[in-house]
Amino acid sequence: MLARIRAGGLSLPPAELRLLESEPTGAGGPRADAVIEACWEGQVARFSVQVKPLATPKALREAVGLARESASPPETYPMVMVPYLSPEKLDELAATEVSGVDLCGNGALVVPGRMLLFRSGQPNRFPQSAKLRNVYRGKSSLVARAFLIQPEFAEVKEIVSLLRRRGGQVAFSTVSKSLKRLEEDLVVGRGGGSIRLLQADMLLEKLAANYDPPGIRERFRGKCALSAREAVRKLSSAARSQGRKLIATGAGSAERYAVLAREPTVSLYCTAPPRELLAAADVVVRETGRFANLDVLQTTDARAFFDPRDEEGLPFASPIQTFLELAGGDKRQRDAAEQVRRSILASLNAVRDDGHA
């Protein structure tokens, strides 16, 4: 990136950018990676630039801090440079009166009272710079979910242990890699001998935005004469006798955590083929999609069975799984998801209060 600057590869039309110094020397304090001059509509300003190879929230925050420390207005103003800056990140920078430029032609020049230029919309020509593991999707998301159960851990092996106790078999290496990304996003932080959740609201938002439903191998819908409680009890017993897993879906667990009027349909995830499970449970069901009151979905997705909640022998999905399934539904379900979200946050606050008691 520094070579690109030295070769004159930095551009932000209609402003003209010119390199004045590359890796300048200085006495004390953080050093700039470069000093550039910007000319636009008769205004000239110099910027102390901090260069970062990635634009994760943590990296960008560190770059902003260093840029501010190395700048000395009005001689030089703070600027950061990364391969790509999205419109949202440019907004964040401009709001803090820090300039930013990327290698794609996007940028914001901010000199309080003198200059304000904003240019965005150029595509990311360096997608590999942002190609990191999505820790909010798939099995990796279980690491993020662990912090919504217990907001603070002493060490990584405690997270691995909690995941295994709650039904999530995640490798130590996967946990370590996921933690690194969560730290980059400023969702969790390390310090004082602990790994702790920093932004629970943001974590829930990211999990919901990236949620993909469990993959379904086989589905059975039908009409059962038994009561919902009796049907689930018999199916759960049959699943245990076969060494299989069975749990209510998140949507099917909604009434346990929120006020939600819904049709009386029993909706279940199981690891066994539905017809095989129904036969083992000796539950007579007429297969039909019309007025069905039993919906059995076969999946091996660990997220569906993670952190189960048992109530009088009936297996319910965790509040987190319930929130994620409802958050992507219709307005009625989204309203219920908000109730569950508030409950999750209240539980986290209670855990924190107990920890400081």
Image: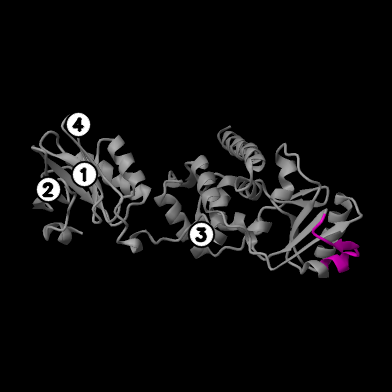
Residue 349 locus on image (x, y percent): 58, 35
Location of the C terminus by quadrant is top right
Residue lying farthest to the top in this orientation? 113
- Looking at the rendering, the stretch of residues picked out in magenta corresponds to 277-290
**Residue for badge 1:** 79
Q: CA distance from mark 1 to mark 2?
A: 15 Å
Question: Looking at the image, which residue is at 55% across and 48% down?
Answer: 208
Color scheme of the displayed model: one colour
Q: Label 1, secondary structure: give it.
A: strand
Give left or right: position of 250 versus 279. Answer: left
Q: Label 3, secondary structure: give it.
A: helix
- 3 and 1 marks in contact (CB < 8 Å): no
Q: CA distance from mark 3 to mark 1?
A: 34 Å
Q: Which corner quadrant of the image does residue 260 belong to?
A: top right
Of residues 132 and 357, the one drawn nearer to the viewer in this rendering: 132
Amino acid type, callout 3: Val
Give left or right: position of 337 versus 123. Answer: right
**Residue for badge 4:** 112
Question: Looking at the image, which residue is at 49% across and 45% down?
Answer: 196
Of residues 98 and 85, the one drawn nearer to the viewer in this rendering: 85
**Residue for badge 3:** 175
Amino acid type, callout 4: Pro
Amino acid type, callout 2: Glu
Question: Looking at the image, which residue is at 70% across and 49% down?
Answer: 251
In front: label 1 or label 4: 4
**Residue for badge 2:** 16
- Vertical side of 34 occupied by 93: above or below: above
Q: Which corner quadrant of the image does residue 110 belong to?
A: top left
Question: Looking at the image, which residue is at 64% across and 46% down?
Answer: 326
